[in-house]
């Protein structure tokens, strides 16, 4: 996109929904959708999780969060009770559960039966919400596919009535795309209505946004990430009158930036933070190595909360998480591990250089404030109403991370930098992707590299879901081997992906998948290819698993063999894909 000059570049619609009408609808709904009670609120005698967290901060307690991803509500409820009881017997406490919703939950209820189902939780009945919040005296957090997606109003309503007092995930609004859902105006209108519903509640309900699920990982400058947090805070608190808090952690592997970001959030937060998530991008199939990563990030997260508590609960992630959804006993075990680290945290704190951490936090705050101010000023000059939360959200989403940083980033102009600006605080995952791509290319046997370059391939690269890092890495390596790359999209609809491959005369489709829908997605893709007469290889990598129909464990299993039977070339990793590409006949060979 060229430099922003006028409103129509981002908001070409002659008319958008009336913001006053949307807010009024949300407030009207609040007359019938009212806060319920749950086991957590009753057990601790509080009216909200925020009230409880302030109490814990005053007591000096480091709080703990567990993420639960079973796709069955009854099993999830049993797991909640078992985890609570097991830790309580050891004299420990778990403070909050985060329920990992399936993408299917993001669709309005009337659409869900016709949409694909992944490996995570789907609440099919109203009573399922109550079953979860009454299972154990632990604060419920409903995150992904709540506020931030098309079913924002319906899901927020159910969560409020079930007694939840924190809910997200506004951050997913920018980067998550639901298959077959292209009306971003209607989705944004639903989010505004849901925010108005939450703001009108008598209970202290906090709306959360996970920076790692939005544009954060796509920035090269971490201060842009913090700046977007400040913009979100303005939208939720100033413009909508609700409460806001930020989640982070997935993409933060460096203890310095984890601690600095947390301390920066502590300076601007009006409400206790939800949780700091685990550094999951560093996990792989090596469980021993994962334990080292686990101990590393937990040690510094615990120290950060002890030294400058922001209310964020610490999240120990089981070492099996890279491969599959962790089971109940694994969640219990990792929380026992975390509690032992908390007991020994005082031995680490004297060795920390907090002055150095705060210097990075200073840069994040200063850069973030400049990003926020630049964005608001630039949008306003283009004719976008920055006091209208619907226009502001739509404009941010449609601008995209790359243009946001290029147009409004706080760093100095620098043509050599990826976004034309020198990062104030470099986003480590972007740098790591570059490094990983260079490593893959460097390790590739020369004969394979030469074979791929000689073939003159055109690749159509896409993802089956919202996770984009695999696609970014694929595109980088392909270009490094002189492979022409067609952008097949993120959460690409199968028919759109086929159309892109046909239009660009792709030689193959390279798909990255993560959330347990690989087999169902492939079936639809193959049907669309047959309909269009497209016969090219499909390379498929990522987490090749799915929950079997009728499973009594709710855990996904490997479906690589079934994917191969259905016509995909499954790849364990990127070198495996490149080896297969080198062996396969290229365009000129096929033409002959």
Image (cartoon, rainbow, N blue to C red):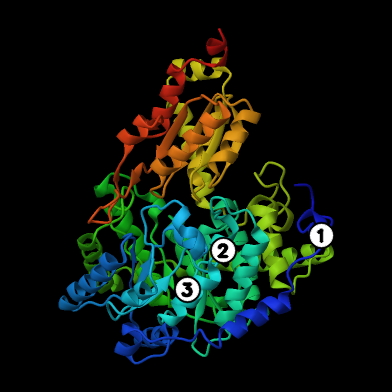
Camera-side residue of 185 and 417: 185
| Quarter-of-image position of residue 79 | bottom left
Closer to us: 189 or 210: 189
**Left or right relative to 391: residue 578:** left
* Disc 2 residue crowd, few under 14, some 14–19, many 20+, Cα 10 Å: many
Please name whichever residue, 169 or 308, is drawn nearer the observer in this view of the structure: 169
In the rendering, at what x and y percent does residue 289 appear? 28, 48
Would you name the residue on which mark 3 appears? Answer: 167
Q: Which residue is mark 2?
A: 150
Q: Residues within 10 Å of mark 1 (few under 14, many from 20)?
A: some
Give the left or right position of residue 191, taking residue 386 as reference.
left
Q: Secondary structure at mark 2?
A: loop
Image quarter (top left, top right, bottom left or bottom right) of the C terminus: top right
The outermost residue toward the top is: 592
Q: Residue at x 55, y 46 (%)?
A: 490
* Closer mark to the observer between disc 2 and disc 3: 2
**Towards the viewer: 478 or 447:** 478
């Amino acid at each position: 996109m060229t430099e922003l000059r006028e409103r129509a570049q981002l908001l070409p619609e002659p008319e958008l929904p009336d913001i006053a009408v949307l807010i009024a609808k949300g407030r009207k709904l609040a007359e019938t959708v009212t806060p319920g009670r749950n086991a957590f609120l009753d057990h601790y005698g509080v009216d909200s999780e925020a009230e409880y967290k302030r109490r814990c901060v005053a007591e000096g307690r480091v709080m703990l969060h567990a993420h639960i991803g079973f796709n069955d509500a009854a099993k999830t409820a049993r797991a909640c009770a078992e985890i609570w009881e097991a830790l309580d017997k050891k004299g420990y406490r778990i403070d909050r559960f985060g329920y990992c919703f399936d993408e299917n939950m993001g669709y309005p209820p009337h659409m869900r039966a016709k949409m694909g189902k992944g490996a995570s939780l789907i609440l099919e009945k109203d009573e399922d919400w109550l079953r979860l919040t009454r299972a154990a005296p632990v604060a419920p957090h409903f995150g992904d596919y709540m506020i931030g997606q098309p079913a924002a109003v319906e899901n927020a309503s159910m969560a409020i009535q079930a007694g939840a007092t924190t809910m997200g995930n506004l951050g997913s609004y920018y980067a998550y795309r639901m298959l077959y859902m292209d009306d971003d105006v209607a989705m944004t209108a639903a989010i505004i209505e849901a925010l108005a519903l939450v703001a009108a509640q008598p209970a202290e309900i906090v709306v959360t946004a996970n920076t790692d699920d939005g544009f954060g990982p796509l920035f090269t400058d971490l201060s842009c990430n913090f700046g977007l947090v400040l913009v979100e805070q303005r939208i939720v608190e100033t413009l909508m009158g609700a409460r806001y808090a930020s989640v982070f952690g997935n993409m933060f592997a460096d203890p310095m930036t984890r601690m600095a970001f947390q301390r920066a959030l502590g300076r601007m937060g009006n409400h206790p933070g939800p949780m700091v998530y685990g550094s999951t991008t560093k996990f792989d199939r090596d469980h021993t190595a994962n334990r080292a990563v686990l101990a590393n990030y937990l040690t510094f997260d615990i120290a950060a909360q002890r030294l400058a508590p922001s209310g964020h609960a610490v999240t120990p992630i089981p070492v099996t998480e890279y491969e599959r959804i962790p089971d109940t006993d694994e969640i219990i075990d990792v929380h026992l591990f975390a509690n032992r680290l908390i007991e020994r945290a005082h031995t680490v704190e004297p060795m920390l250089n907090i002055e150095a951490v705060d210097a990075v936090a200073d840069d994040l705050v200063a850069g973030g404030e400049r990003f926020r101010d630049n964005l608001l000023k630039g949008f306003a000059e283009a004719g976008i109403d920055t006091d209208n939360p619907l226009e502001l959200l739509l404009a941010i989403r449609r601008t995209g991370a790359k243009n946001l940083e290029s147009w409004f980033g706080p760093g100095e102009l620098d043509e050599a930098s990826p976004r034309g600006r020198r990062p104030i605080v470099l986003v480590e995952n972007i740098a790591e992707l570059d490094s990983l791509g260079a490593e893959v290319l460097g390790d590739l046997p020369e004969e394979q590299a030469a074979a791929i370059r000689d073939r003159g391939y055109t690749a159509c690269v896409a993802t089956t879901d919202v996770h984009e890092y695999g696609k970014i890495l694929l595109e980088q390596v392909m270009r490094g081997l002189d492979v022409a790359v067609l952008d097949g999209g993120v959460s690409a609809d199968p028919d759109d992906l086929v159309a892109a491959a046909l239009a660009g005369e792709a030689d193959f489709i390279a798909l990255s998948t993560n959330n347990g829908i690989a087999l169902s997605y492939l079936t639809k893709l193959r049907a669309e290819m047959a309909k269009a007469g497209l016969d090219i290889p499909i390379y498929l990598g990522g987490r090749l698993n799915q929950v079997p129909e009728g499973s009594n464990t709710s855990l996904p299993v490997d479906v690589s063999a079934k994917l191969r039977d259905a016509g995909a070339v499954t790849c364990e990793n990127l070198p495996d894909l490149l080896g297969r590409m080198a062996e396969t006949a290229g365009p000129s060979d096929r033409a002959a």
